[in-house]
Image: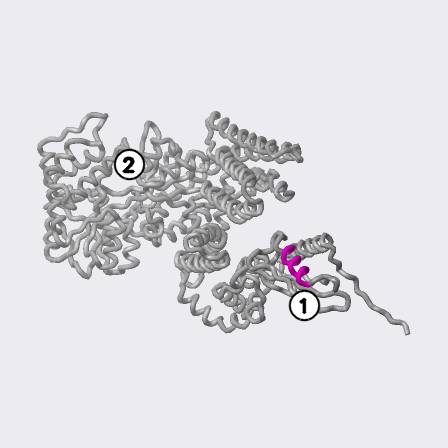
Amino acid sequence: MAAERSELRWRPVKGLRLLAALALLLTCGGCAGGIGFVPDTLYISIETSTAAGSAPELGGHRRVSQRLIDKFRSLNPGVDVHVSNYPADGLVAATRYRNSRGLGPDLIVSRVITAQQLHQQGLSSAVTLKRDTLDRLHPRFLKSFREGSKEFAVPFLAQPQVACYDRRRLREPPRTIDELLALSAKGLRVGLPLTISELFWTTTAQGASDVVGQLLEGPANGQAATFSAADHQALDRWIRWLHDASLQQNVSFSDDPLDLIQQLQRGQRDWISCNSVWIDGLRQRMGPNLGVSVLPGGTDVPTTPISRLLVWSFGRHSSARQRLLAERFVAFTLNEVTQKQLMDSVPGNLPVNPNVLIPTRSSALMASLAFSLDHSRLLDFPDPEGAIARSRWLESVLEKVVLGELPPAPALAQLLARTP
Amino acid sequence: MNQLLYEIVGWLGFLTRPVVLLQCLSAAAIALGYALWMRPRLKNRRYRDSVLAAVGLWFLLRLNGLVIEWLGYPNGLATYFSQAWAVWVVLTVVRLLLLTRFPAKEIQRLYSRIVQPLFLLVLSGSLVNQLASLRDVAEIPLFPLFGPPLTSGNLFLLLIIPYFLIAFSAIPLVWFGHLVQRMFHFSDGSRDAATLVLRYLVVAVGVLWLFHRVGLNTSAIAAIAGGLSVGIGFGTKEVFSNFISGLWLLFEGSVRPGSVLFIDGDPCEVRSLGLRAAVLWRNRDNAELVIPNQTFFTATTTTYTGSDRLRRSEVQIGAAYRHDPAEVIALLEEVARATEGVLGDPAPRAFLVGYGDSSINYSLRYWIDDPLGNLAIQSAVSQAVWHAFATKGIEIPFPQRVVHQI
């Protein structure tokens, strides 16, 4: 009984000790920060392309980004750089979570639409880079991020959409989408993505780029979207082409870009539409058998893909020192030497600094990438949340079409009837 | 390993941010104030006062978060501190409530083995998640181990999962054992044996799953284990011998938790049968004996609980020559029957066992169903015999010697 009584004593002391220890640690840390014991630390969040983590995408990229960080640290001794990777659908939520604690990143590398989400939700702060740093950038890339007199993000690298194929199965890549289907009828195994940003290039040959672009960007100024008869016909042609493609024995669709990449690596596909971000990993596995070309367009009409643009956004709760380091880091990544090194070390990355020459004459790969980027479309997303919803809605309709659930005519009616 | 240390040290960099420092220092000041000012005043006070003080601390921490939010700064970290403290207080209050209903020892074991380690685990995981991407931290490579590098997450799993496998498997398996016993009417010993064997199985399967999950090269482990088996065999021969003996004894049923064995002249109850040794409790002096399993395997064991739990006991007594032995025997049997703890079936029996120098010697034999209670029941029977003899006028003679002087 005495033992039981002793058990009844209040014993939160262990928890208190923990809390007190934590408090002491933090207090010491705080003091230490004041006297310079804590190293200068820069926190960077990176948006990855798949939910499978950074490893499948990065491949050698991790090594390259580490080299980039090492070079920056050699220029700024005593600075630690910490990188966190988040999948595309988790970066905004993760940043919101960390910002709510004051632990948000100092810098964020993401796609444009994510940067716009971060900006609109107040999770990033305006760019305060010096004008001469921003002047290094191609105005084409910069204009999308201007709000008033300031930018909310800074372009970093461009990653265009191209065709990747197996040279053992295909000597000459198709130039038009009709050639592509003809080759598939002869046995070429084609893999097409179902994500609208990566399938957008198929609209060019059908003349549906503008109407699909409108569907994606949404109605301007809150006005209901109006489509002309020509738009209807173009959209109809595009959906029918997708439907016909899905009926081909050797054409398959996938809603996961990584799935297509792996199928090409394993030899299960001969030709796929892929983003240049995957080229480095594909090269490591396929070696010289990997072919990269411009995506097929229409007859005498080059295709208009949507290129991915990686951008820098600045965090909200950096200390003055961290903010300074973040600006230095961004300026460092935008200078000619770094941009060229990034282009050379990771094939698939194109510079946003126009002073860096892309070796289009000496490299067929670079020529394809540059051509694709030059002809690509950069979409504006004034309403990023709406754009994501519209993309998902469009993709769900297209998925039903390619799976045979929805014939082209009702699919067209659905697309024209409402825009989320 | 360096990368992990680099990452951990890097978290200190957050403290250079004023908004982080504000949250941490304000919470730290409140916690230290509680520890240094409030705690000493709670000594020798009722636990209700301590609970109220702890709730007060939580309230202050929460208020701190709200004030920081009101000032327009991020307050998630301050809120996190108050939430962590709230969870700890709730766990402690639940513990106090459980102590009023369940044995203190069981609750203490539950908390020290499961609840507190689990709380620490969740707290440290959530703390890392506040500071960095838990996934990235888990993917930090540390050192190569039979192939690809072992990541920090996998090292953590290798250290934590076996502990929780052992700690967690006990409670559900004990429940399962009781359920099966109720369904199939096992004895307590069989239930405990089945539970222990099941626990070994669960732990073994869990460890194999862990190796698979962590991605350890099982072929390499098997090859190394094969190579080392001779050395391990010699080095840990006794351990394995004891382990195998323990399993064998469990299946055989001769020694199980709950069994009563005769060790060095004393009845002892088997408390547990572990990997290496059995723990027995000796009633006489409340001692716990730790005996290697192998001992039971190789030596003769006397048990009172082999086929049943009955024990036959005996009281020897002498009565004067002038009393009719039939009357004495009837009286002894009647006395035994009337004594608490003595079984009616098998019935007590008394025997005339010899003619002594001073008395006729009798033996009263009876059965009890609690082997460990022999001494107490024997004492009760002896006292009852004395009282019965006194009532009936039966003399228990002193030793006599007739001396003839010539």
Camera-side residue of B278 and A177 = B278
Instruction: From the viewer's perspective, tell me whether residue B53 is left or right of residue A379.
Output: right
Against B383, residue B35 (above or below) is above
Q: How would you classify the magenta stretch by its main secondary structure?
A: helix
Against A196, residue B236 (above or below) is below
Asked where in the image residue B372 lies, by quadrant, the reply is bottom right
* Magenta region: B325-335
Instruction: From the viewer's perspective, tell me whether residue A211 is left or right of residue B332.
Output: left
The picture places residue A340, in percent across and down from the top left corner, at 33, 48
Share a chain, discs 1 and 2? no
Instruction: From the viewer's perspective, tell me whether residue B5 is left or right of residue A2.
Output: left
Q: Residue B353 carries which label?
A: 1
Q: Name the residue under label 2.
A: A139
SS class of the residue under badge 2? helix
Which amino acid is tagged 2? Pro
Residue drawn at x 22%, y 50% is A367
Which amino acid is tagged 1? Val
On the question of residue B152 being in view, the answer is no
Whether residue A101 appears in magenta in the rendering, the answer is no
Q: Which chain carries label 1?
A: B
Q: Residue furthest right?
A: B406
The picture places residue B177, in percent across and down from the top left corner, at 45, 54
- In what quadrant of the picture does the C terminus of chain B appear? bottom right
